Amino acid sequence: MKLGFIGLGIMGRPMAKNLLNAGEELLVADLNKEAVADVVAAGAVEASYTEIGEQCERIIIMVPSGAISKAILFGQGGVASTVKKGAVVCDMSSVTPVESKECYEGLKKLGVGFVDAPVSGGEPGAVAGSLAIMAGGDQEDFDAMKKYFDILGNSALLIGPSGSGSVTKLANQIIVNNNIAVVSEAFVLAAKAGADPEKVYQAIRGGLAGSAVLDAKVPMIIERNFKPGGPIRINHKDIKNVVNTAHAIDVPIPYTAQLYEILQTLKIHGHMEDDHGGIIQYFEKLADVEVKKAE
């Protein structure tokens, strides 16, 4: 069975390669021709959206926004113009629940299944095939994609109906990004007070303050390594989706609203391509201190 894969960015490219390494026959598309050439060299075949719709019974999309996903599916020359009844499309992008439901309903009219299945784990998880996959949709469509989820991640769970995966990713992003912000605030305090950030980290990581975020981000921060595994640009988009979704259903989100303004500030100062550990630069600017390894 041929598998279509659309979107070969920081996450999609290693995901596609993992599918190829597992023996899947892959048709791929992306606007970045260098990325396409790289994945084609690994064994994939380049194809247009219409060719992917015509030839593939299972299709994965991994792109920056819901608007792009909808254009790929329903725009002129899109996948939906040729996709066959009985196919299943899986959008692994981080989008809003409303956008996921729109894709689900649009494809359902064509007899095509749709699963929203965003991921957590960043580029390291995409490379290692250890992503956490949170899905929304119908059980039969989830089951149809499960073999691919098992290649791409360590865990895949169907949360509920269409949009549930996207809701879960929004909740995930609230926790991850606010956690990074709080860690940043704490380590700026420690550095300004004259403590060695590396020793502070070693002292607290085994206690209740320990977390996956602490272990993933503090070593990068003190080395001043902001090469993106998950760029602020993507998290800025996700937190904007959180704010818009929460406001639409009358859920106050005071911490996350403030976080969005922090990300807006980082955007203005040119940090959108930094790793989201680079959120610390906002707090460093406020305190006029840099958190780094002791010399």
Image (cartoon, helix red, strand yellow):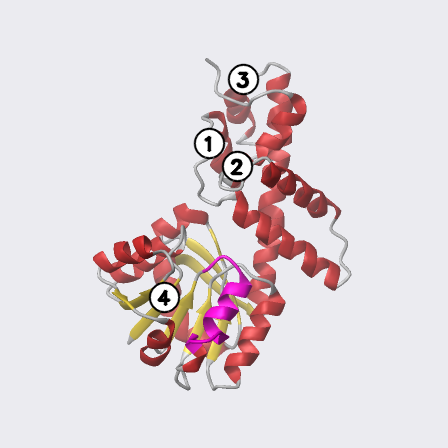
The residue singled out by tag 4 in the image is 5
Is there CB contact under 8 Å for labels 1 and 2?
yes
Pick the quarter of the image with the C terminus. top left
Report if residue 209 is visible in the image: no
The residue singled out by tag 3 in the image is 196
Q: What is the span of residues highlighted in magenta in the rendered image? A: 63-79
**Helix, strand or loop for disc 4:** strand
Numbered label attached to residue 124: none
Q: Please identify, in this view, whether the residue under mark 4 or under mark 3 is nearer the observer.
A: 4
The residue singled out by tag 1 in the image is 220
Answer few, some or many: residues within 10 Å of disc 4's Cα (few below 14, many 20 plus, some between 14 and 19): many
Return the disc, 4 or 2, that comes first in the chain's sequence. Answer: 4
Q: In the picture provided, is 171 more to the left or to the right than 65?
A: right
Is 14 rendered above or below residue 143? above
Is there CB contact under 8 Å for labels 4 and 3?
no
Compute the Cα span from label 1 to label 4: 31 Å
Return the disc, 4 or 3, that comes first in the chain's sequence. Answer: 4
